[in-house]
């Protein structure tokens, strides 16, 4: 197979040039100047006018299988990921049953392989049942295929359990992804605490709930001499705290979500539960601080926190509806929007969904080298389109971007040289 | 002026002119309430459904009397918190009520935002009788009605609200309403009972009660919920009463002509002693009386009457 005439953009090598890519046996056999390709029998894909990017890695998603297949399952989630140009998905452990043992891990991986539309790499639970008390079987789960551990959805509240978890996980070379939230400060909060929550009469989640826990988590990690990855950072203060310990050799890392980069709490002034997420949408000051994090350093990754919820659940009152938005199909268009509106280099943003998560997770992928797996996205940077519900491939339609017009569209996705998505 | 709203969801959305219109119309209805025959045919043939998803005696009774005195047919439904959460969503319930074609739904609800949603999605009138910690607009209107009746004006009055500002829908609605009509608003509470960003509210903030007692025209005492004590907002009732309760000593410090208000129900001995609640400065029962008139005015305005054709 040969992908001809596209503009290859690869953050790992810094390469940004027109190229022909020859693919054989699921891997990149060679990258050549346009028209100079050797070999590559079979299909020719014309990528003229398109960008050719490494398949994206989304290090934070919820596929809901096993147990909540009415929201999403591995098949629908994989299809949505493929449509978003995401070839590797890290799925969180808060399924039912919880992925806190190798049997559940195995079943997720087997199911994803059978579906075959995306590489699904589970994160195992840090603690049994995500309850924050007893360590889960991290070692055995790693043998079954987990690439990280996380109690996502919940913090590890007990600091001594966290310390042991960090030490134990690093024994097995497992990255630890932390949802940093002080539950006692967050209380019954459902949105950012501030003048708007006071006006709407909704209980608030103070920025301090995140900032206090990030600082504690970083302190424990420094002491345990292990790295941690803080997921879905939402406040400027939390990002500053992470930035402040970047110089240490331990490698504290973090990700931010597209919705925290493109939306603020103002979105929920009509009590629309689609915008109810945890951590909550924050202020414009926080949003700009997160964006600044691409320029001055501390932001490593962009992850969707893809969290499907059924329409019936989101139809509840704002206080009662579940937290979360879907995000697979809007990841790359959102990145393009950030690039265009905030003048942040596309290469920098692309690294946040390719090489950086690959490095943090210690997995192959996110690169376009000779010999690398042929996970590719063909992206039309000029196509203008509008997200409508019928385009959403997830079972749940809770996207905060419904009705938005985007510039840039995923045209085709290849997983190990196999086409797993073609735009209509 | 013309009243063009089918709903009353919040004070925040009203103009000063609209607020004063409600007060003017209320005065007419107050007169009816004092007649021998307390009933006018204004809303004959209209159906008003009262949906109360939170315990309430006074507000429900007040709305029901208001509707009945206007000759509307009323059905009141009280639903306990736990039973409605199971199964049927609140929107299902609302759509079912709507299918029976009422002209107005009066809704009290434990969570913020539902009245706004009903007003948007239902073709009938929706009147908010209190939603979570958001707003309680009819309470604020009856409070303003009572103040204007006593002082003959609202602009320039110094109104002090004392107590749980952070969690009170009554406080929110009153702050908005009083600011719109040009009153001077003070809030008095420990920091734990104030919103974290109170500085953005455009009110005077006091942590000490005595200086405000001496200066205010109106002391509006808010009900203190026991659950705030469990949330460590204050240590105990004794300490609360000492620093923020209205007792005989503080009543004696009040300005001549100054009055005491309370939205009810009163926690006697906590935020207010019986001498203060029942004494000559208290206009608590005037508030209750005006509540019926204000709700009659709102039903009349929202259900199609115009302010000019009475």
Image (tube, coloured by chain):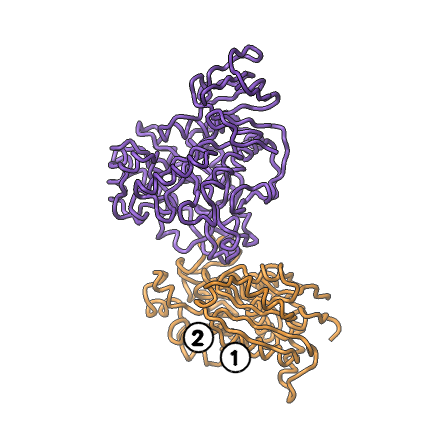
Chain colours: A purple, B orange
Query: Residue extending furthest bottom?
Result: B36
Q: Nearer the viewer, residue A37 or A131?
A: A37
Q: Residues within 10 Å of mark 1 (few under 14, many from 20)?
A: some
> At x 40% / y 60%, what residue is drawn?
B190
Give how far across and how far down residue B17 sits, in percent: 67, 64
Q: Would residue B185 be visible to someone looking at this image?
A: no
Q: Residues at marks 1 and 2, common chain? A: yes
- Residue A205 shown left or right of residue B95 in the figure: left
Instruction: Give the answer, above or below, for where B291 lies relative to A86.
Output: below
In the rendered image, which quarter is residue B286 located in?
bottom right
Secondary structure found at label 2: loop
Mark 1 or mark 2: whose residue is earlier in sequence: 2
In the rendered image, which quarter is residue A402 located in?
top right
Give how far across and how far down residue B262 sits, in percent: 48, 73
What label sits on residue A40 in the rendered view?
A: none
Give how far across and how far down residue B60 sits, in percent: 53, 75
Give how far across and how far down residue A27 sits, in percent: 45, 21
Secondary structure found at label 1: helix
Q: Which chain does the numbered disc 2 sit on?
A: B
> At x 43% / y 51%, what residue is drawn?
A205
Q: Which chain does the numbered disc 1 sit on?
A: B
Instruction: Give the answer, above or below, for where B142 lies relative to A358.
Output: below
> At x 70% / y 66%, what residue is drawn?
B3
Q: Nearer the viewer, residue A155 or A266?
A: A155
Query: Residue extending furthest right?
Result: B309
Pointer 1: what residue?
B285
Q: Nearer the viewer, residue A150 or A3?
A: A3
Pointer 2: what residue?
B266
- Residue A251 shown left or right of residue B197 in the figure: left
- In what quadrant of the picture does the C terminus of chain A appear? top right
Q: Would residue B297 be visible to someone looking at this image?
A: yes
């Amino acid at each position: 197979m040969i992908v001809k005439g596209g503009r290859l953009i690869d953050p790992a090598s810094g390469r940004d040039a027109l190229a022909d890519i020859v693919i054989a046996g699921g891997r990149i056999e060679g990258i050549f100047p346009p028209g100079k390709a050797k070999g590559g029998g079979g299909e020719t894909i014309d990528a003229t006018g398109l960008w050719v990017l490494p398949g994206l890695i989304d290090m934070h998603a919820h596929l809901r299988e096993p147990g909540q297949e009415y929201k999403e399952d591995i098949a629908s989630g994989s299809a949505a990921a493929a449509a978003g140009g995401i070839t590797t998905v890290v799925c969180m452990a808060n399924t039912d049953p919880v992925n806190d043992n190798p049997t559940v891990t195995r079943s997720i991986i087997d199911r994803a392989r059978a579906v075959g539309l995306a590489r699904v790499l589970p994160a195992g639970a840090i603690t049994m049942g995500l309850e924050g008390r007893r360590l889960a079987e991290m070692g055995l789960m790693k043998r079954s295929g987990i690439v990280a551990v996380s109690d996502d959805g919940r913090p590890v509240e007990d600091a001594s359990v966290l310390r042991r978890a960090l030490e134990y996980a690093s024994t097995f070379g497992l990255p630890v992804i932390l949802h940093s939230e002080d539950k006692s400060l967050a209380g019954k909060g459902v949105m950012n605490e501030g003048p708007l929550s006071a006006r709407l009469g909704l209980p608030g989640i103070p920025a301090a709930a995140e900032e206090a826990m990030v600082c504690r988590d970083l302190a424990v990690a420094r002491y345990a001499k292990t790295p941690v990855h803080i997921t879905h950072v939402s406040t400027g203060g939390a990002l500053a705290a992470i930035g402040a310990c970047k110089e240490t050799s331990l490698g504290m890392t973090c990700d931010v979500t597209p919705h925290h980069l493109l939306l603020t709490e103002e979105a929920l002034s009509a009590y629309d539960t689609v915008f109810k997420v945890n951590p909550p949408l924050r202020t414009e000051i926080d949003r700009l601080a997160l964006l600044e994090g691409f320029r001055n350093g501390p932001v490593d990754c962009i992850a969707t926190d893809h969290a499907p919820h059924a329409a019936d659940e989101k139809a509840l009152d704002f206080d009662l509806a579940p937290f979360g938005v879907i995000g697979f199909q809007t990841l790359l268009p959102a990145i393009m929007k950030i690039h265009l509106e905030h003048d942040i280099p596309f290469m920098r943003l692309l690294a946040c969904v390719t090489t950086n998560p690959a490095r943090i997770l210690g997995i192959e992928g996110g690169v376009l080298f000779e010999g690398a797996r042929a996970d590719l996205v063909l992206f039309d940077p000029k196509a203008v389109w509008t997200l409508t519900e019928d385009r959403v491939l997830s079972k749940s339609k809770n996207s905060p971007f419904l009705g938005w017009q985007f510039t840039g569209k995923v045209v085709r996705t290849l997983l190990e040289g196999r086409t797993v998505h073609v735009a209509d | 002026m013309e009243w063009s709203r089918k709903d009353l969801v919040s004070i925040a959305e009203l103009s000063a002119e609209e607020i004063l219109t409600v007060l003017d119309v209320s005065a007419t209805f107050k007169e009816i309430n004092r007649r021998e025959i307390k009933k006018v045919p204004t809303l004959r043939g209209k159906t008003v459904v009262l949906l109360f998803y939170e315990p309430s005696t006074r507000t429900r009774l007040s709305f029901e009397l208001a509707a009945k005195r206007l000759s509307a047919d009323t059905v009141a439904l009280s639903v306990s918190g736990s039973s409605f959460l199971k199964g049927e969503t609140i929107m299902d319930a609302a759509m079912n009520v709507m299918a029976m074609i009422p002209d107005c739904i009066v809704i009290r609800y434990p969570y913020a935002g539902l009245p706004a949603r009903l007003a948007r999605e239902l073709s009938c009138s929706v009147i908010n009788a209190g939603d979570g910690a958001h707003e309680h607009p009819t309470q604020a209107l009856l409070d303003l009605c009572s103040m204007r009746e006593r002082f003959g004006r609202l602009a320039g009055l110094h109104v002090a609200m004392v107590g749980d500002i952070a969690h009170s829908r009554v406080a929110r609605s009153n702050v908005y309403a009083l600011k719109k009509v040009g009153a001077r608003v003070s809030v008095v509470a420990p920091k734990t009972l104030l919103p974290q960003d109170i500085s953005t509210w455009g009110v005077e903030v006091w942590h000490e009660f005595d200086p405000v007692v001496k200066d205010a025209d109106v002391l509006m005492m808010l009900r203190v919920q026991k659950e705030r004590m469990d949330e460590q907002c204050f240590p105990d009732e004794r300490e609360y009463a000492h620093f923020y309760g209205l007792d005989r000593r503080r009543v004696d410090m009040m300005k001549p002509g100054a009055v005491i208000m309370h939205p009810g129900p009163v926690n006697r001995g906590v935020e207010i002693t019986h001498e203060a609640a029942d004494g000559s400065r208290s206009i608590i029962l005037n508030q209750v009386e005006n509540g019926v008139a204000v709700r009659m005015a709102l039903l009349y305005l929202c259900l199609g009457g115009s302010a000019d054709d009475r």
